[in-house]
């Protein structure tokens, strides 16, 4: 497992940037006999990277990551998720769909999109060589409410992200305010009750990997016995 270093420049993050690969990255990259602790540290070393470039994962590498994603906990095995890979010129088509969504939203809200905002929206999919969109296509099941299907998608997305990381690629999970606008749902051919749950931007990065500030578990974790 390996991952190139990177910078989280245009990702919402309150975390400081570091200037070296973490120990966890290197340990897992160079050692096939990983201990539990090393594997845990490798999971914790994942960071979102905003500026992504080539090399991008190949179709085989993407399929391997999706193969991992679909092992997510999935009540009644409904497989409510779909994975759509957008690359090359298809990113412009996605950009057009996002722009149509932004324009429709602006019209609804009685505002006018500036040219700068239009261009920014259209260019969003160009921030990485590959975007894997994960949709949740809600299945009707009396024992599996929609929220479970959404949560299952979230677990699938995290598996996807870690499997891409294991193959040396960086990612950022984005949604944004446009992802579930009607124009975007139509673009992905999903229904009104379905969701675009993630745009997983992926590729490589040549910048420094940000280090993560320690997270205080005290208010987050409680044991009862
Ligand atoms: C469902 C979901 C949607 C997100 N959407 C965005 C987004 O649109 N833009 C963004 O910058 N970050 C978004 N994030 C947050 C980043 O993916 C990332 O988790 C955050 O910047 C913290 O960085 P880290 O993953 O390195 O801890 C989203 C996260 C989740 C779980």
Image: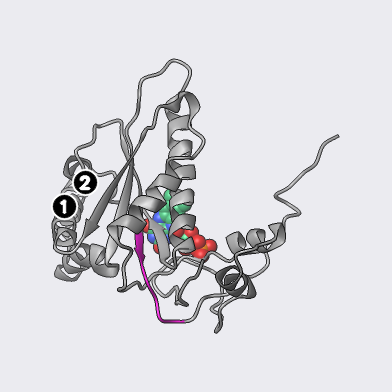
Q: Is 174 drawn above or below residue 54 in the view shown?
A: above
SS of the residue under disc 2: helix
Q: Is residue 202 magenta?
A: yes
Q: Is residue 73 magenta?
A: no
Q: Which residue is mark 2?
A: 184
Residue 60 drawn at (x, y percent) = 32, 56
Crowd rating for badge 2 (residues with CA inside 10 Å; few <14, some 14–19, many 20+): many
Q: Quadrant of residue 217?
A: bottom right
Residue 176 visible: no
Rendered residue at 65%/58% (across/down): 40
Q: Is 100 drawn above or below residue 137 in the view shown?
A: below
Nearest the viewer among 45 and 18 is: 45
Labelled pair 1, 2 in contact (Cβ < 8 Å): yes
**Magenta span:** 201-207
Q: CA distance from mark 1 to mark 2?
A: 6 Å
Q: Is 120 drawn above or below residue 6 in the view shown?
A: above
Rendered residue at 55%/84% (across/down): 19
């Amino acid at each position: 497992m390996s991952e190139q270093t990177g910078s989280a420049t245009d990702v919402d993050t309150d975390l400081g940037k570091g200037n070296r690969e973490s120990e966890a990255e290197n340990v897992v990259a160079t050692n096939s006999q990983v201990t539990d602790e090393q594997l845990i540290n490798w999971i914790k070393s994942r960071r979102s990277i905003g500026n992504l470039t080539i090399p991008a994962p190949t179709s085989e590498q993407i399929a391997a990551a999706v193969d991992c994603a679909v092992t997510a906990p999935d009540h009644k095995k409904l497989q409510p998720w779909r994975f759509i890979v957008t690359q090359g010129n298809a990113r412009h088509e996605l950009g057009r769909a996002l722009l149509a969504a932004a324009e429709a939203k602006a019209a609804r809200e009685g505002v006018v999109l500036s040219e700068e905002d239009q261009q920014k929206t259209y260019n969003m999919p160009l921030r990485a060589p590959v975007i894997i969109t994960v949709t949740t296509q809600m299945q009707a099941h009396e024992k599996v409410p929609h929220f479970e299907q959404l949560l299952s998608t979230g677990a699938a997305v995290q598996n996807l992200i870690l499997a891409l990381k294991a193959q040396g690629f960086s990612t950022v999970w984005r949604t944004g305010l446009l992802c579930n606008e009607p124009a975007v749902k139509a673009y992905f051919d999903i229904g009104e009750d379905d969701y675009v749950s993630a745009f997983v931007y992926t590729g490589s990065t040549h910048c420094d990997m940000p280090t993560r500030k320690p997270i205080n578990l005290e208010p987050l974790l409680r044991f009862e016995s």
